[in-house]
Amino acid sequence: MIVFKVKWTPLDMTHWQTRIAKSYQDVLKVYPPGCLDWLRESEPGRMVELKATVEKIKRAYTERDSQGLDAALTSYRDTHLKTFEDYLLEVKTAA
């Protein structure tokens, strides 16, 4: 099987840069204050997991892999939102 890599056009690049920026902004909008400190103290392994989602985005973008980038953005969002949810549940239970 022969696989051809497709070069992205400048329009494609702008599209993905905008999607990446929007994903980052959307997650930051719902970031619960204190979550980062909680992660450092209670869940350091999750910090590694969250950073890995960013690396997947960077890798897919660099490789110009549209499907991989779409999946990486979804993973980034879902992983962060689940972490925020767990943090808020922890804070609520501790109160």
Image: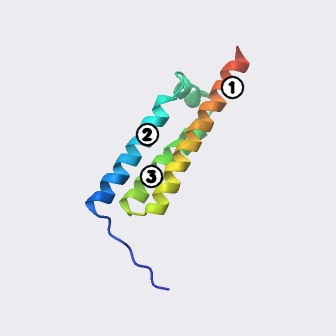
Residue extending farthest right? 93
Secondary element at image label 3? helix
Find residue 54 and report its horizontal and vertical position in percent: 46, 47
Residue extending farthest left? 10
- The C terminus lies in quadrant: top right
Q: Which residue is mark 3?
A: 57
Question: Along the line of sight, which residue is nearer the eye, 4 or 94?
Answer: 4
Q: Quadrant of residue 64?
A: bottom left
Q: CA distance from mark 1 to mark 2?
A: 23 Å
Question: Along the line of sight, which residue is nearer the eye, 10 or 86?
Answer: 10
Q: Mark 1, residues whose alpha carbon is within 10 Å: few (<14), some, or many (≥20)? A: few
Q: Does residue 87 lie above or below 54 as drawn? A: above
Q: CA distance from mark 2 to mark 3?
A: 11 Å
Say whether disc 2 or disc 3 marks the residue closer to the N-terminus.
2
Q: Mark 2, residues whose alpha carbon is within 10 Å: few (<14), some, or many (≥20)? A: some
Residue type at numbered disc 3: Ile
Residue type at numbered disc 2: Tyr
Residue type at numbered disc 1: Leu
Is 73 left or right of 84, judged from the image as shown? left
Which label was assigned to residue 89?
Answer: 1
Say whether disc 1 or disc 2 marks the residue closer to the N-terminus.
2
Which label was assigned to residue 24?
Answer: 2
- Whether pointer 1 and pointer 2 mark residues with C-beta atoms closer than 8 Å, the reply is no
Find residue 18 and report its horizontal and vertical position in percent: 35, 47
Q: Does residue 50 lie above or below 56 as drawn? A: above
Q: CA distance from mark 1 to mark 3?
A: 28 Å
